[in-house]
Image: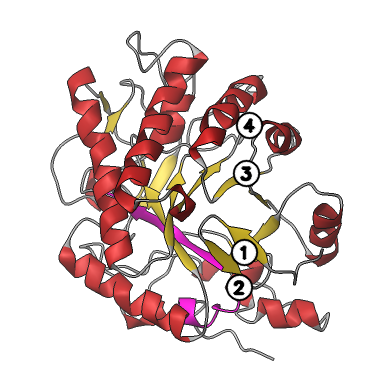
């Protein structure tokens, strides 16, 4: 087994084990609609075994950053259809990453006046970019009422339906990086005393019910994946000794039959624990280069490896890996800027 071996994930097969990571690129318009430029961007990278898109909002309330895409109206669905068509035309597979930012939001980046929502009314540390006001602190969220939570979960189901209508092969729940599902998982962000807070089982409940809603809409768990980032100190999440909680989550979702669990390694060794606790396919990301990725596959640490920044600067990353060609370096100054520069203009071999 190596990076170029085929792999079955849920209800479909991929031609290699090189996965493109979800990466925010901020090329949508103010309504969360992407353009043909993004179809070109993903189409150029379609030889990845699987592309996982940038985080995409499930509702207006789920949006919080400048120029990020959504999947909650027909205009957005039509734009995504151009992208899935571009990838499929080249034989690629593509999953949409579903994202609800929760408390990681600023009013200058939103089209609604309401405060963001979260498990608890705790402002996340840190700043975010707004096009109109520059860097700003995250807004203070309000805590979701217990009776509101089923509707938020249902939004993920509706977003799954729209994603499949847009031609995606499947969807990934973004339960990492400090966004709403991760906020429910975190004892530092979730101070609830009802059935969604307190114990590990209760804190896991939102994520499990959300996955169940997505599976019910998709009609197959093989079209659903999930990303987690145990120990990642980002967006105000700083959980200590979190591996047992994530082991419990992995064990709880194993019977669902997901296409995969996508784990971001963060230096605490959680990926090894989740490899044992989760019975399905495991995708592993976090700073891999070719040789280390091959080693991880040979040793059985993962079933596929997720690459982020290398795909930004190397649209032909798979071809470069095949011939051991040198990689181009990405320009961080263009990661989130509008337009084609640093997006679709990196040369190929």
Disc 3 is placed on an element classified as loop
Rendered image coloring scheme:
secondary structure
Disc 1 is placed on an element classified as strand
- Using the rendered image of the protein, determine whether residue 62 is visible from the camera's viewpoint: no
* Residue at horizontal 48 percent and vertical 19 percent from the top: 188
Disc 1 vs disc 2: Cβ atoms closer than 8 Å?
A: yes
Disc 4 vs disc 1: Cβ atoms closer than 8 Å?
A: no
Q: Mark 3 points at which residue?
A: 280
Q: Answer with mark 4 or mark 1, whichever residue precedes in sequence.
A: 1
* Residue at horizontal 56 percent and vertical 35 percent from the top: 254
- Answer above or below: position of 36 versus 148: below
Q: Disc 2 to disc 4, how far (Cα)?
A: 28 Å
Q: In which quarter of the image is the C terminus?
A: bottom right
Q: Disc 4 to disc 1, how far (Cα)?
A: 22 Å
Q: Answer with mark 1 or mark 3, whichever residue precedes in sequence.
A: 1
Disc 4 is placed on an element classified as loop
Residue 204 place in picture, x, y as percent? 46, 24
Q: Name the residue under label 1.
A: 19
């Amino acid at each position: 087994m190596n990076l170029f071996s085929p792999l079955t994930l849920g209800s479909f097969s991929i031609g290699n084990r090189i996965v493109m990571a979800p990466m925010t690129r901020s090329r949508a318009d103010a309504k969360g609609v992407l353009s043909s430029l993004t179809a070109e961007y993903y189409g150029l990278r379609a030889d990845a075994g699987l592309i996982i898109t940038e985080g995409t909002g499930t509702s207006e309330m789920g949006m919080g950053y400048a120029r990020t895409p959504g999947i909650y109206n027909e205009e957005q669905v039509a734009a995504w259809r151009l992208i899935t068509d571009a990838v499929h035309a080249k034989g690629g597979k593509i999953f949409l990453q579903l994202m609800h930012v929760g408390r990681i939001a600023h009013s200058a980046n939103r089209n609604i006046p309401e405060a963001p929502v979260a498990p608890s009314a705790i402002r996340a540390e840190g700043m975010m970019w707004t096009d109109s006001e520059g860097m700003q602190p995250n807004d203070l969220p309000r805590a979701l009422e217990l009776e509101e939570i089923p509707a938020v979960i249902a939004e993920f189901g509706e977003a799954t339906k729209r994603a499949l209508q847009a031609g995606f092969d499947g969807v990934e729940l973004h339960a990492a990086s400090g966004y709403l599902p991760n906020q429910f998982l975190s004892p530092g962000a979730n101070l609830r005393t009802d059935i969604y807070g307190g114990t590990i089982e209760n804190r896991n409940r939102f994520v499990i019910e959300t996955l169940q809603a997505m599976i019910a809409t998709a009609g197959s768990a093989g079209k659903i994946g999930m990303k987690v980032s145990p120990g990642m100190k980002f967006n105000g999440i700083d959980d200590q000794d979190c591996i047992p909680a994530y082991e419990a989550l992995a064990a709880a979702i194993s019977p669902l039959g997901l296409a995969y669990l996508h784990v971001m390694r963060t230096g605490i060794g959680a990926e090894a624990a989740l490899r044992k606790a989760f019975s399905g396919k495991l995708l592993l990301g976090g700073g891999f280069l070719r040789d280390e990725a091959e080693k991880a596959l040979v040793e059985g640490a993962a079933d596929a490896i997720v690459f982020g920044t290398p795909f930004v600067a190397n649209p032909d990353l798979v071809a470069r890996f095949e011939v051991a060609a040198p990689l181009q370096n990405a320009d961080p100054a263009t990661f989130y800027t509008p337009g084609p520069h640093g997006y679709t203009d990196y040369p190929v071999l």
